[in-house]
């Protein structure tokens, strides 16, 4: 039944997503502030269109949270849907084949910044709710919070959750902001890595110098920064910050054995990324390296002359953005401190160092024996004719552990993306097949809880 | 006599320099092409104003060389004056206190890109020649070549010198594009380091990835580039490229002893640069490190997300511009090859590496027993009442060895700048005292050769 309704509405459901993707709602960059706010209004309108009640923009110190609810029966369970309407910056813009905020549909995919992360994914819930409410088939209560600061670390969400603790009471949280193994191997994410994101600044001389006049006697902050970064991690990916691994929860051999059953094709993986060899800790498999192990990546580096041609400058400053993915039980505030102490300790005396934390989040593991997980499993089985594989993955959704702490509720991560969606990259896209399959799955999910 | 003439003309001599400094003649950046060409025309006009003959723009594959000559007496020696009218890029532009191409005079200095390197310096020759020609006091023949590609490695100058070998015949070359120890300790540069300037590109995956999904299993090209850069040089500044030091001409203890007599105040040096400690090879003094020793500096580095805020990207590519200062007898083509071989060798198999040489130049040592050197020494003595100290310095003027090779002629490096002039940096300036003292010295220089 749901499948037919979705087919009939296909072009409208797609057109609405196109409209949503047109907003350059980049929360990281102040010059897009108005676009982010316009996007929030659009989302509120679409919650109303879905038939939700009490739709409003709940203010925070930053961008507002769009709220809506449908309370039908006090005896039924209550789901809290979380999503985010903000998106990553679109840089490097010149690598996009079409403008990031002018959605293009090609080869069964919709290309735009935010297509998969998270506009295309949270919007499936709105369409499923619209169908269910119209057809009197919604068999649970729902509350919906769509925030605008996920890509900048959900800075104000904990304060928000504390302030609206009562309003947000629920039995479980559902988030569609993750990927499946593949469309043939549906999976549900059961573990997420945490995040610790730092910015460092290394200062040498008080101004840019001529490298011919001073080179050899004055420390070059770029050379020094590179040396310091090379001391953060060995060549196998082992992180050298003292104490970094200390609190990590060991993953049982049983769990590692179960994970090793997930399909993985090394040659296809390397070919897809055009690399000759993978990287990382030899004693762990590729899937383990990106899920149950912490990592350290330099996300950005800059300093000196980066224009056309050559300039023989010995620069005053060099900078890097460095993030670490964390696993249970690493505390991101503790890791920030360990990073900062170590980074300052390894700085030679001929430079000055400044370390600033950007944002962070706790790692999280979600239960596979909860009511919500079982309902999600059942909904996927109905739609895909396959039982989803429970899977720990590498990304971070720090709010999962925050919700557990503040609201005392577990989350089910019912995501429909694919790792190849190029989220956070040029040419981000979302498969239309996944968009409509997701709506169908969510219709099953919300209609069988009574 | 010259001093009085200069004082009378002071305001005009300064106003003309201001006009010259207004041209943004940045040879490294194609968008300034017209400005570079306009600047060449201006210089040609001023050669005519000085009374030079045969003034013309001699074309090259790049920017033209401005030529002029004054041939008076076949029995007198012929000087070939070399200078350059192109300038370095002005980045980082926001650190300038006044716009780089709107010259400002403040505290006895003129602030503008090119003020000392090299517009303010070559223009002194034009004013000295004007005075001498007007007063019938020029006692040598002069030829003048002012080029427009010095800041991009004088790419076309060797071809030019070969093509005009006969026209450029001379007894010695004189260049004002270097510094003195201080105005109290006049010096003449007798040695220059060579240059080898490379650009490297490290490619990891074929596109930017989400660091949460791939981090830990896919090599991050920034982390790898940093590791590779840290393998180029140890923490004392010793360069680790095999064979790098092999051909270096040993500097005699006698010469090192003579150099050690040059005044150097470590505390003032550190304070001036606001550093807690200097850098470099322990077995050499600071002055030796920047003059008789080769060095390696990263002049620029970039990759990943460098905007505001945080973006958890695992980038596809990272880049660096890396230059080495060379000393006699290092051959820059050989060093390019050694660098490239080593850089490719230290790359792990999970990345691809591209190495591109930008430009280079041979190191050079100029004789202190030549006719031209003695005349320069005498001219400084007359103007400063002090004998100049012969000094090897750190910068590179690759054309010195090229002129020796192609024209068979030695150069005298009669520079009037100061190391504090901030050449290649924001707020480049030239002291007016040095500008007028330079003109006076050059009047003596060119008027006593008969």
Image (tube, coloured by chain):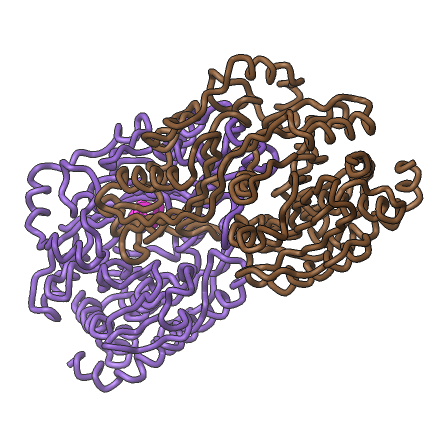
Chain colours: A brown, B purple
Front-most of A84 and B218?
A84
Give the residue drawn at x 25%, y 37%.
B237
Q: Is residue B315 visible?
A: no
> Measured from the top left, where is residue A86 in percent x and y?
63, 52
| B246 lies left or right of A266 | left
| B399 lies left or right of A14 | left
Q: Main secondary structure of the magenta part?
A: helix
Front-most of B372 and B147?
B147
Quadrant where the C terminus of chain B sits is bottom left
Give the quadrant of residue B234: top left
Front-most of B63 and B369?
B63
| B248 lies left or right of A40 | left
Question: Vertically, is A337 above or below B115?
Answer: above
Q: Is residue A153 visible?
A: yes
The magenta stretch spans residue B407: yes
| A200 lies left or right of B124 | right
Q: Which residues are magenta?
A: B398-408
The magenta stretch spans residue A29: no
């Amino acid at each position: 039944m749901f499948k037919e309704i979705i087919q009939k509405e296909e072009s409208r459901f797609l057109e609405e997503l196109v409209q949503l993707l047109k907003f350059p709602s980049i929360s990281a960059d102040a010059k897009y502030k108005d676009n982010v706010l316009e996007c929030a209004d659009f989302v509120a309108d679409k919650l109303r269109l879905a038939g939700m009640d009490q739709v409003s923009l709940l203010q925070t110190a930053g961008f507002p949270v769009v709220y809506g609810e449908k309370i039908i029966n006090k005896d039924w369970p209550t789901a809290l849907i979380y999503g985010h309407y903000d998106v990553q910056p679109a840089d490097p813009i010149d690598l996009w084949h079409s403008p990031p905020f002018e959605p293009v549909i090609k080869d069964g995919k919709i290309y735009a910044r935010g297509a998969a992360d998270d506009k295309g994914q949270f919007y499936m819930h709105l369409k499923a709710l619209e169908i269910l409410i119209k057809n009197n088939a919604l068999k649970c209560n729902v509350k919906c919070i769509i925030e605008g600061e996920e890509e900048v670390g959900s800075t104000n969400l904990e304060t928000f959750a504390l302030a609206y603790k009562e309003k947000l009471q629920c039995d479980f949280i559902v988030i569609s902001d993750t990927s499946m193994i593949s469309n043939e191997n549906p999976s549900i994410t059961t573990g997420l890595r945490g995040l610790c994101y730092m910015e460092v600044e290394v200062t040498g001389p008080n101004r840019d110098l001529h490298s011919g006049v001073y080179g050899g006697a004055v420390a070059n902050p770029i050379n020094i920064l590179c040396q310091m970064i090379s001391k953060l991690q060995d060549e196998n990916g082992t992180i050298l910050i003292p104490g970094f691994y200390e609190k990590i929860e060991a993953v049982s051999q049983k769990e590692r054995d179960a994970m090793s059953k997930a399909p993985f094709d090394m040659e296809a993986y390397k070919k897809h990324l055009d690399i000759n060899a993978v990287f990382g800790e030899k004693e762990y498999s590729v899937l383990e390296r990106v899920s149950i192990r912490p990592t350290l990546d330099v996300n950005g580096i800059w300093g000196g002359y980066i224009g056309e041609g050559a300039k023989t400058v010995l620069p005053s400053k060099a900078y890097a953005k460095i993030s670490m993915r964390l696993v249970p039980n690493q505390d991101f505030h503790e890791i920030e401190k360990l990073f900062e102490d170590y980074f300052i300790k390894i700085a030679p005396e001929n430079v000055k160092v400044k370390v600033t934390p950007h944002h962070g989040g706790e790692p999280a593991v979600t239960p596979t024996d909860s009511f919500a997980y079982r309902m999600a499993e059942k909904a996927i089985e109905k739609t895909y004719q396959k039982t989803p594989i429970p899977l720990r993955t590498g990304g971070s959704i720090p709010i999962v552990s925050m919700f557990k702490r503040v609201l005392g509720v577990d989350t089910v991560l019912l995501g429909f993306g694919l790792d190849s969606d190029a989220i956070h990259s040029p040419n981000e896209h979302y498969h239309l097949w996944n968009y409509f399959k997701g709506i169908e799955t969510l219709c099953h999910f919300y209609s069988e809880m009574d």
